[in-house]
């Protein structure tokens, strides 16, 4: 799953570069890659956050070290990151309701970021550190896309 996530992120960046160079297919590349990334976060966010290999997702022992709170937090983080991806897509394509999607996804993701930061400061658990990094990058990227779009 991490490899798929990284590939999709690279394709999103390639689409942004294509848009900057005014290449015709940039909109299609951006739309498809951001849509796939948002879908990956929505349906597979808990797999990414819990660091479970895809082939072991249906095995009960894969979740042995994960509490219900971690699984629930991973699902909520995935939904928030998916909402941010969709909001960024709507901003890039100039579709209606883009700002509402960014605000709602940002609120969810920032809440997960703050909770993860507090938990990490108390436990120094690697799970929370990875959550901080992933949600922080997503929130920052969405904010940059929003600001750049406002300037253009």
Image (cartoon, rainbow, N blue to C red):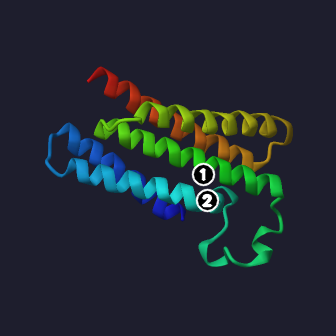
Residue located at (46% from left, 35% from top): 142
The single residue placed furthest to the front in the displayed view is 96
Label 2 – label 1 distance at C-alpha: 9 Å
Q: Is mark 2 on a helix, strand or loop?
A: helix
Where is residue 68? Give x, y as percent: 82, 57
Question: Is 104 placed above or below 54 here?
Answer: above
Residue 151 to residue 143: above or below: above
In the picture of the structure, the residue carrying the numbered disc 1 is 78
Q: Which residue does the image show at 66% across and 46% down from the upper left?
A: 131
Q: Earlier in the sequence, mark 2 or mark 1?
A: 2
Q: Which of marks 2 and 1 is in front?
A: 1
Q: Where is residue 50 in the image (x, y as percent from the top left)?
A: 70, 59
Q: Where is residue 101 in the image (x, y as percent from the top left)?
A: 48, 37
Near mark 1 (Cα within 10 A), the count class, few <14, some 14-19 or many ≥20, is: many
Work out whether residue 8 or residue 109 is closer to the camera in this orientation and state it. 109
Decide if residue 152 is on the left or right side of residue 6.
Answer: left
Q: Where is residue 26 in the image (x, y as percent from the top left)?
A: 22, 48
For residue 35, what is the image quadrant? bottom left
In the rendered structure, are the residues bearing label 2 and label 1 in contact, judged by CB atoms less than 8 Å apart? yes
Q: Which of 118 and 91 is in front in this view?
A: 91
């Amino acid at each position: 799953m991490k490899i798929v996530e990284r590939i999709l992120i690279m394709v999103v960046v390639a689409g942004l570069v294509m848009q900057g160079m005014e290449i015709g297919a940039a909109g299609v590349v951006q739309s498809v890659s951001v849509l796939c990334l948002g879908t990956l976060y929505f349906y597979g966010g808990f797999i990414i956050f819990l660091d479970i290999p895809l082939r072991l997702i249906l095995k009960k022992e894969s979740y042995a070290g994960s509490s219900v709170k971690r699984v629930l937090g991973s699902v909520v983080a995935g939904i928030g990151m998916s909402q941010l991806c969709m909001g960024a897509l709507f901003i890039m394509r100039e579709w209606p309701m883009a700002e509402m999607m960014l605000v709602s996804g940002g609120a969810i993701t920032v809440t997960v970021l703050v909770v993860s930061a507090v938990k990490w400061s108390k436990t120094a658990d690697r799970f929370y550190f990875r959550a901080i990094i992933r949600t922080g990058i997503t929130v920052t990227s969405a904010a940059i896309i929003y600001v750049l779009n406002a300037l253009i």
